[in-house]
Amino acid sequence: MAKAKLDAVIAAVPLFDTLSKRHLKKVAGLTTTVEYDAGDTVIQEGEPGDSFFVTVAGQAKVVSGGKMVHRLIPGDHFGEISLLDGRPRSASVVAETPLSLLRLPRASFLRLVRDDADLARALLASLARMVRRVDRSLAK
């Protein structure tokens, strides 16, 4: 995938949408493309979360407690909470078609956040904005 396209895919993720171009390039530089066949399990509910993913091509289903709760298409992402806290996955993701994903490993991401205070502050601001949005929607 071309670098400019990769940066744009990362920039479309709400957690990263306020990052500078320089920081987007750093995050994008940590990603790899992974491929799955239809029927493959990408992540398993209950397992430790060690990566964040963005769907590039294909379709997958999100399954929680044995029930499908969501369908993922290109541009969708999953695993952002595990990226931050490393806790067990709240759902499984299973490829419904051949699937191409960008994978951002948690360990690499945490090293980047530790080493770049400006990026860490930008992520905290983004998280605060997301919490405020949820807060407002719950208050209605």
Image: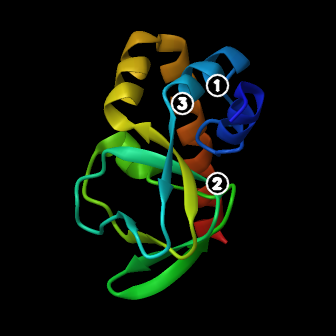
- Mark 3 near mark 1, Cβ–Cβ under 8 Å? no
Q: Which residue in the structure is indicated by mark 2?
A: 133
Query: Which of marks 1 and 3 precedes in the sequence?
Result: 1
Dot 3 falls on a residue whose secondary structure is helix
Q: Nearer the viewer, residue 135 or 34?
A: 34
Q: Report x, y in % for residue 15.
A: 58, 41
Vertical position of residue 134 compared to residue 30: above or below = below
Name the residue that disc number 3 marks: 123
Choose between 36 and 113: the one closer to the eye.
36
Q: CA distance from mark 3 to mark 2?
A: 15 Å
* x and y, in percent, of residue 3 in the image: 70, 26
Q: Is residue 39 left or right of residue 119?
A: left
In front: mark 2 or mark 1? 1
- Residue 66 lies in quadrant: bottom left
In the picture, residue 75 is in which quadrant?
Answer: bottom right
Which of the image's four quarters has the C terminus?
Answer: bottom right
User: Which residue shows up at 48% across the image and 27% down it?
Assistant: 30
Element class at badge 2: helix
Q: Amino acid at mark 2?
A: Arg
Mark 1 Cα shell of 10 Å, populated few (<14), some (14-19), many (≥20): many
x and y, in percent, of residue 11 in the image: 70, 36
Instruction: Say which residue label 1 marks.
Output: 24
